[in-house]
Image (tube, helix red, strand yellow):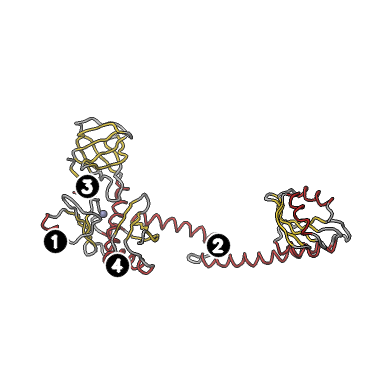
């Protein structure tokens, strides 16, 4: 059986070992060593990566207590190799995993909820709890977790004797067989766990709860510790700086600047609508009286402006007045006014111009799929 060096020293990143076997697999080679510092995937944490001599270790897995190093090239059986862990990634996982124990211990102690799910991803981890955490709970848990970090408490990993184990009250997701490894965060948590941990809580740096959602009757937390927490802060800081520059607002005042901008935009929209109406009506008033049918385009007009224009425009003509709005890309909206008999004609007009809509005897509204030219041509000959 492979000696688990990561169990003895979680900080061991370079080691030598003998190659016991090397067999081709679907995705490379499966290498078994006499001892290893590579932690195999388990308990919600991915397997370690790194190198064995010049060969890359892409993943580490454990099956029936045998540890397999997945490599991209073969190694000579019987040779001694030097293993090097991608320790930056391993340490990131240690910071997060130890942080998880602290948060789960605090949630359990404070609220009595069990940790029922754990996944340590590439930039954050998720933890599922059996009960609902309110915003006040989340704030209290986060504060207590960071207090535990500042206290720089000891984290101890060991295999207690069977008799002693029976007397220890520890958290565990499942019934455990064989030797049980107990991870104790001094004064905070006692939990069965196979993963490498930091020696003292101060190494975690910071624990931030970045998201909380309802999950299967309980809560799923997204948590970032150590370097992940710093990366999250850097991302948010870059975003805040960009917003501050855009809003010309001092730090911490972007949301009030956004609120003001929203209000200014609403005021502008209202003023624009009024100006549009006045401009359209002025252009209408300049048209000569006595036309037959009139087609009048107000590209940006809303329904209200179009109806006002239609009421004024009909005074200029003897036939129908057609007010169009839009840019033609998605057709045109229309409001048509007449002195009567319009409802009976609506179907005919819509059929001719790919339109839909209807209304009263004196005004109909809807949309046309036809082009401006087709609409103008149609109303040249149209009689009501
Ligand atoms: Zn654990």
| Cα–Cα span, label 1 and label 2 | 61 Å
Residue hosting label 2: 247
Ligand 1 within 8 Å, label 1 CB: no
3 or 1: tag closer to the N-terminus: 3
Measuring from the top left, give residue 53's x and y in whole percent: 27, 35
Camera-side mark, 2 or 3? 3
User: Could you say whether the residue bearing mark 4 is in a helix, strand or loop?
Assistant: helix
Measuring from the top left, give residue 185's x and y in whole percent: 23, 60
| Cα–Cα span, label 4 and label 3 | 33 Å
Q: Is residue 55 above or below residue 221?
A: above
Say whether marks 4 and 3 touch (CB < 8 Å): no
Residue hosting label 4: 111
User: Could you say whether the residue bearing mark 1 is in a helix, strand or loop?
Assistant: helix
Say whether marks 2 and 3 touch (CB < 8 Å): no
Q: Residue at x 16, y 50 (%)?
A: 179
Residue hosting label 3: 6
Residue hosting label 1: 167
């Amino acid at each position: 059986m492979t000696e688990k060096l990561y169990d003895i020293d979680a900080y061991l990143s370079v080691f030598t070992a003998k190659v016991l076997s090397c067999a081709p697999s679907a995705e490379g080679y499966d290498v078994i060593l006499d001892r290893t510092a590579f932690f195999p995937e388990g308990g919600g944490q991915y397997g370690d990566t790194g190198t064995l001599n010049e060969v890359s270790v892409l993943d580490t897995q454990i099956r029936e207590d045998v540890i397999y190093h997945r490599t991209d090239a073969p190694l000579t059986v019987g040779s001694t190799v030097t293993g090097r862990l991608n320790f930056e990634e391993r340490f990131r996982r240690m910071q997060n995993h130890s942080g998880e124990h602290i948060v789960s211990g605090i949630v359990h102690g404070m609220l009595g909820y069990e940790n029922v799910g754990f996944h340590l991803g590439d930039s954050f981890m998720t933890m599922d709890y059996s009960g609902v955490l309110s915003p006040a709970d989340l704030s209290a848990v986060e504060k207590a977790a960071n207090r535990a970090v500042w206290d720089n408490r000891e984290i101890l990993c060991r295999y207690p004797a069977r008799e002693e184990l029976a007397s220890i009250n520890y958290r565990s997701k499942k019934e455990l067989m064989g030797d049980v490894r107990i991870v104790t965060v001094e004064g905070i948590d006692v939990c069965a766990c196979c993963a490498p941990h930091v020696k003292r809580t101060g190494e975690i740096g910071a624990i931030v709860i970045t998201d909380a959602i309802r999950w299967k009757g309980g809560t799923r937390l997204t948590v970032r510790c150590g370097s992940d927490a710093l990366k999250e802060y850097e991302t948010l800081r870059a975003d805040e700086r960009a917003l501050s520059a855009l809003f010309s607002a001092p730090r911490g005042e972007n949301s009030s600047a956004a609120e003001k901008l929203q209000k200014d935009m609403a005021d502008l929209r209202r003023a624009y609508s009024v100006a549009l109406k006045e401009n359209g009506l002025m252009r209408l008033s300049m048209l000569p009286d006595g036309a037959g049918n009139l087609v009048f385009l107000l590209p940006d007009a809303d329904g209200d402006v179009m109806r006002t224009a239609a009421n004024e425009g009909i005074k200029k003509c003897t036939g129908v007045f057609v007010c169009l709005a839009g840019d033609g890309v998605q057709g045109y909206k229309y409001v048509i006014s007449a002195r009567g008999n319009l409802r009976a004609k609506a179907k005919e007009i819509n059929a001719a111009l790919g339109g839909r809509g209807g209304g009263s005897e004196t005004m109909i509204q809807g949309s046309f799929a036809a082009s401006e030219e087709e609409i103008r041509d149609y109303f040249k000959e149209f009689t009501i």
